[in-house]
Image (tube, grey):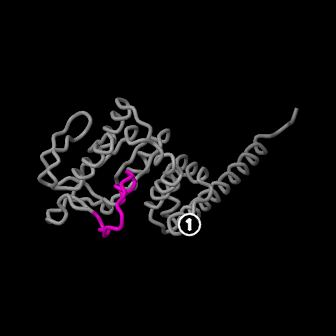
């Protein structure tokens, strides 16, 4: 039997907690450094470590980043970029019929006449915004396309449809959280160029490239959205 006083127990307990705190700070620091290396230099090191930190210490990691003067958005950006890298090869090998394309309703035109149903918005392909272009191309390739106003619809899609891979468009935070929930699938994400609830923008070329469309050497444009300007109406 080991005789231990209450004071000794609390002393050891305190040392253990202190050591755990130091290890956690080291883990968060290393993850932030490796994450910035991925974003800035496109070099992925220890992906499982990065995902473990982001998934388990998500909120804490954001506060830690903010305390260092770094925009907390970087946590979501790291999560999305890591999963894109890890899942890229499997996603490409998956047939379009086994993939779904999930687009946010905030990309639609202000005069959009799409109706809302249980699976999301039903696009009328009016070509007033980029949604119709991406939807038509996706369906032509074999993708099942969903246009959703929120994450609750994503849950319904998962429950009612069979698929192996997902390509999603959203702001970094929504993308990261959704990709966490869909971790058993091969996920790819394209972040919005402009966040918000309306008048958002996305790099349509990037979405098409992720879908597997060969774009050749056509001029690259910055992004497409629900802009009222004629050159954005269904153009890429």
Coordinates of residue 91 in the picture (x, y in percent): 46, 46
- For the point 42% across and 41% down, the residue is 95
Task: Depth check: give the residue in front, 25 or 152.
Answer: 152
Q: Main secondary structure of the magenta part?
A: loop
Coordinates of residue 110 in the picture (x, y in percent): 14, 55
Examine the rendering and report whether any part of residue 148 can be seen.
no
In the rendered view, does 228 fall on the left or right side of 76?
A: left
Residue matched to label 1: 37
- For the point 51% across and 50% down, the residue is 89
In the rendered view, does 25 fall on the left or right side of 156?
A: right
Q: Quadrant of residue 124?
A: top left
In the rendered view, does 43 fall on the left or right side of 136?
A: right
Q: Quadrant of residue 4?
A: top right
Q: Magenta segment range? A: 206-223
- For the point 49% across and 58% down, the residue is 78
Element type where label 1 sits in the image: helix
Using the image, determine if residue 139 lies above or below residue 30.
above
Question: Is residue 111 found inside the magenta-colored segment of the image?
Answer: no
Coordinates of residue 99 in the picture (x, y in percent): 39, 41
Neighbourhood count class around disc 1 (C-alpha, 10 Å): few under 14, some 14–19, many 20 upward:
some
Examine the rendering and report whether any part of residue 224 can be seen.
yes
Using the image, determine if residue 83 lies above or below residue 99.
below
Task: Depth check: give the residue in front, 5 or 164.
Answer: 164
Q: Residue furthest right?
A: 1
């Amino acid at each position: 039997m080991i005789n231990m006083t209450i004071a000794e127990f609390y002393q050891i307990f305190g040392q253990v907690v202190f050591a755990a705190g130091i290890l956690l700070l080291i883990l968060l620091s290393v993850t932030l450094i490796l994450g910035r290396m991925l974003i800035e230099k496109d070099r992925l090191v220890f992906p499982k470590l990065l995902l473990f930190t982001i998934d388990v210490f998500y909120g804490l990691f954001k506060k830690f980043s903010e305390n260092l003067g770094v925009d907390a958005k970087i946590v979501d950006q790291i999560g999305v970029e890591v999963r894109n890298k890890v899942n890229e090869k499997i996603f490409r090998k998956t047939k379009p019929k086994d993939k779904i394309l999930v687009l946010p309703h905030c990309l639609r035109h202000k005069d959009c006449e799409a109706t809302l149903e249980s699976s999301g918005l039903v696009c009328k392909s009016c070509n007033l915004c980029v949604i119709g272009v991406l939807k038509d191309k996706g369906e032509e390739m074999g993708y099942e396309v969903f246009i959703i106003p929120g994450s609750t619809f994503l849950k319904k899609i998962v429950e009612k449809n069979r698929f192996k891979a997902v390509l999603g468009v959203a702001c970094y935070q929504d993308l990261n959280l959704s990709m966490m929930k869909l971790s058993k699938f091969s996920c790819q994400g394209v972040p919005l160029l402009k966040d918000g609830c309306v008048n958002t923008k996305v790099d349509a070329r990037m979405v098409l490239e992720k879908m597997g469309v060969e774009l050749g050497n056509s001029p690259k444009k910055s992004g497409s959205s629900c802009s009222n300007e004629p050159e954005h109406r269904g153009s890429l």
